[in-house]
Amino acid sequence: MIPQSFEYFRPETISEAIALLKEHGDGAKILSGGQSLIPMMKVRLARPEYLIDINRLENLQYIKEEGGFLKIGGLTREADLETSSLIRSKYPIILDTAAMIADPQVRNLATVGGNLAHGDPANDHPATMLALGAEIIATGEDGERTIPITAFFLSVFTTALQHGEILTEIRIPIPPAGSGGAYFKLERKVGDFATVGVAAQVTLDGSGICRRAGIGLTNVGATPIKAVRAEDLLVGKTIDEQQISQAAQLAAEDAQPSSDLRGPAEYKVSMVRELTKRALVRASERAVR
Ligand SMILES: Cc1cc2nc3c(=O)[nH]c(=O)nc-3n(C[C@H](O)[C@H](O)[C@H](O)COP(=O)(O)OP(=O)(O)OC[C@H]3O[C@@H](n4cnc5c(N)ncnc54)[C@H](O)[C@@H]3O)c2cc1C
């Protein structure tokens, strides 16, 4: 099939883009990497009348540490994450995540902002951003507002972004010394969406006690899931085999997968348990390195 016809705009500034979104109302959609929107348009699951291409907007493609945050511009490509020396040296959990998304062709175009704004529970960055305690910066006609990642994913393909807002930045508090994270994903074949994915981020103090834990689950519910009970269990304890096993059990209990072509629900729950263990082991190893 071919997409329904649409009018195409390519604004040069954020304010121009926001004005176009306002002018054309609900019929308008933002186009960034196009790696989710264009496939949906081709099967007419999405039928925007006006496409506002934000690829020309300046200063939205960056990865930098500033003011206590790792800041990632909304138009930053997955490939930028993979080649960033900052991400490679300090944020292996983000590298794990980006490197498992689709294939190099998709990653050259797909943006981190689009991955989150799309609100697809099968996408990989949402779980990682939940584990890292990220914030989303949305820019609209009244300026910027900050949305905690825990309040961002509302339901399938629905986020807290309002019409007329552009996701311009992702902010991640710079983890203190003694922190480490990892993302594990089970996929049917390389490049597939996750059957199940688990992101884990921990901070250990000098005695090896866990001071912060973040755990996010991919594709086991209508939204990405923050495994809060598992996180709470780990804080204040030494992360050993027993604690990891108990946390993994709690994370598995919080998963709400459906049976589909990627496997029965019970299998996915078991995989959450197993991948949570693996992610916590790797995160702890990275934390003490
Ligand atoms: C073959 C294939 C395999 C894939 N496999 C994976 C995978 O394994 N894991 C994974 O996570 N993803 C996967 N994807 C999805 C890919 O990562 C998408 O590109 C990404 O989810 C959306 O980013 P985008 O920049 O392409 O957004 P677009 O497709 O341009 O937009 C997606 C949606 O988000 C909105 N949007 C985009 N940017 C913004 C913004 N800055 N502000 C507000 N709204 C915005 C658009 O209006 C649209 O509704 C795959 C895609 C393909 C084609």
Image (cartoon, rainbow, N blue to C red):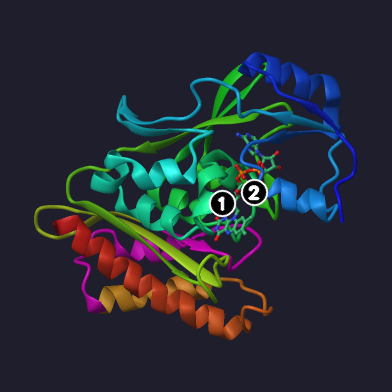
Q: Amino acid at mark 1?
A: Val
Q: Give residue 173's quadrant in the image.
A: top left
- Label 2–label 1 contact, CB within 8 A: yes
Q: Which mark is residue 106?
A: 1
**Residue lying at 55% horizontally and 71% vertically, measured from the top left:** 255
Whole-Å distance between the Cαs marked 2 and 1?
7 Å
Badge 2: how crowded within 10 Å, few (<14), some, or many (20+)? some
Instruction: Quickly name the residue at label 2.
Output: 35
Return the x and y of residue 64 as percentages of the image width and height: 34, 30
Tally of numbered tags = 2
Residue closer to the observer: 284 or 244: 284
Q: Is residue 83 above or below residue 20?
A: below
Query: Element at badge 1?
Result: helix
Which residue range is magenta in the image? Answer: 215-241
Q: Earlier in the sequence, mark 2 or mark 1?
A: 2
Residue closest to the far right:
5
Q: Residue 238 in magenta?
A: yes
**Residue lying at 27% horizontally and 41% vertically, measured from the top left:** 85
Q: Give residue 262's quadrant in the image.
A: bottom right
**Residue lying at 45% horizontally and 60% vertically, measured from the top left:** 100
Q: Which mark is residue 96?
A: none
Q: Is residue 1 visible?
A: yes
Whether disc 2's CB lies below 8 Å from ligand 1 is answered yes
Location of the N terminus by quadrant is bottom right
Return the x and y of residue 34 as percentages of the image width and height: 66, 43
Residue 196 located left or right of residue 259 = left
Whether disc 1's CB lies below 8 Å from ligand 1 is answered yes
Residue closest to the far front:
105
Residue 150 located left or right of residue 37 = left
